[in-house]
Image (tube, rainbow, N blue to C red):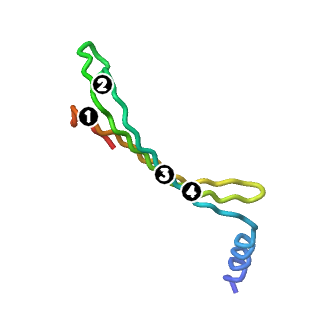
Amino acid sequence: MKALPLMLAACMILSIPASAQWSAGAYLGTLLDDNAFNNHLQLGDRVTELSLQTAYDWQTDASDLRIFYTGAGSSFALVPSRTFY
């Protein structure tokens, strides 16, 4: 009988009207940097950028909850040691 109040509470929480939505996106771009190290040497480089996003939105009349992940990376053509993700 102790489980009955928990089951009733779970049913009340699960019966709250809500809507949910998944979203995702990606960006891929290239840029030419005439001073990649930002110093007096002024070494240029070609940088390829990649960004990925995904999110899950859960909305009710009184609240909005979003869980998301964003990953980004840049790949340097002339100086690969500067590449990061």
Residue under circle 4? 23
Q: Earlier in the sequence, mark 4 or mark 1?
A: 4
Measured from the top left, where is residue 10 in percent x and y? 69, 74
Q: Secondary structure at mark 2?
A: loop
Q: CA distance from mark 2 to mark 3?
A: 28 Å
Q: Earlier in the sequence, mark 2 or mark 4?
A: 4
Density class for disc 2 (Cα within 10 Å; few <14, some 14-19, many ≥20) is some
Taking 19 as reference, is 29 left or right? left
Residue drawn at x 46%, y 49% as measured from the top left: 26
Residue under circle 3? 69
Name the foreground residue: 77 vs 71. 77
Density class for disc 1 (Cα within 10 Å; few <14, some 14-19, many ≥20) is few
Q: Quadrant of residue 58?
A: bottom right
Q: Amino acid at mark 1?
A: Arg
Q: Are marks 2 and 1 in contact (CB under 8 Å)?
A: yes
Name the foreground residue: 58 vs 30. 30
Q: CA distance from mark 2 to mark 4?
A: 33 Å
Q: Earlier in the sequence, mark 4 or mark 3?
A: 4
Q: Secondary structure at mark 1?
A: helix
Q: Quadrant of residue 15?
A: bottom right
Residue drawn at x 33%, y 25% as measured from the top left: 33
Measured from the top left, where is residue 17 in percent x and y? 75, 67
Q: Which mark is residue 11?
A: none
In this view, 13 is above or below 54: below
Q: CA distance from mark 4 to mark 1?
A: 31 Å
Density class for disc 4 (Cα within 10 Å; few <14, some 14-19, many ≥20) is few
Q: Amino acid at mark 3?
A: Tyr
Q: Select label 2 or label 3 by which is in front.
A: 2
Residue under circle 2? 36
